[in-house]
Amino acid sequence: MSKAHEAYASASRIAPKDPREFEASILTRAAGQLQRIRDNWTHENNTALYDALVYNRRIWTVFAASAAEVEHPLPREIKQNIANLAIFIFKRTSEIESATEPQPQLLDTLIMINREIAAGLYGR
């Protein structure tokens, strides 16, 4: 089992019983981490930025891997949308990590995607 799957499995033991609520909560947590970094942007917060990006990438790695499973019950179109979002998130994360001087506004889309998906999962 990958580290991302292990983290997800470990957290799910203490998570709410509803998997949608759990997924929404971890997306909200990731968005919050990224937002705090965005709001308090300095070029010295590289460690916090890296940690938040890794956490977010792990979440989306699990989502993408889960959606790629043949027996996953979601409709094909939704699974494809999850895969496309994950690819975008991986590219944006790589862009931020590889930038000589990353700009805080590059986090905006990651934050917005996480919040919007979480809101949908919470049923808002």
Image (cartoon, rainbow, N blue to C red):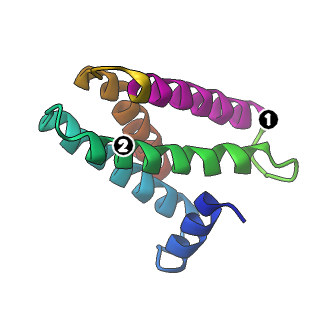
Disc 1 is placed on an element classified as helix
Instruction: Identify which amino acid the numbered label 1 is placed on.
Output: Arg
Residue 83 pos. (x, y %): 67, 33
Which residue is nearer to you in this view: 53 or 21?
A: 53
Name which quarter of the figure residue 76 lies in. Answer: top right
Outermost residue, right side: 70
| Residue 72 drawn above or below residue 40 | below
Which residue is nearer to you in this view: 57 or 114?
A: 57
Which residue was labeled with disc 1? 76
Left or right relative to 9: residue 100: left
| Residue 108 drawn above or below residue 51 | above
Residue 20 is a magenta residue: no
Residue 84 is a magenta residue: yes
Left or right relative to 24: residue 84: right
Q: Nearer the viewer, mark 1 or mark 2?
A: 2
Magenta residues span 76-96
Instruction: Identify which amino acid the numbered label 2 is placed on.
Output: Tyr
Name which quarter of the figure residue 9 lies in. Answer: bottom right
Which residue was labeled with disc 2? 50
Residue 80 pos. (x, y %): 72, 30
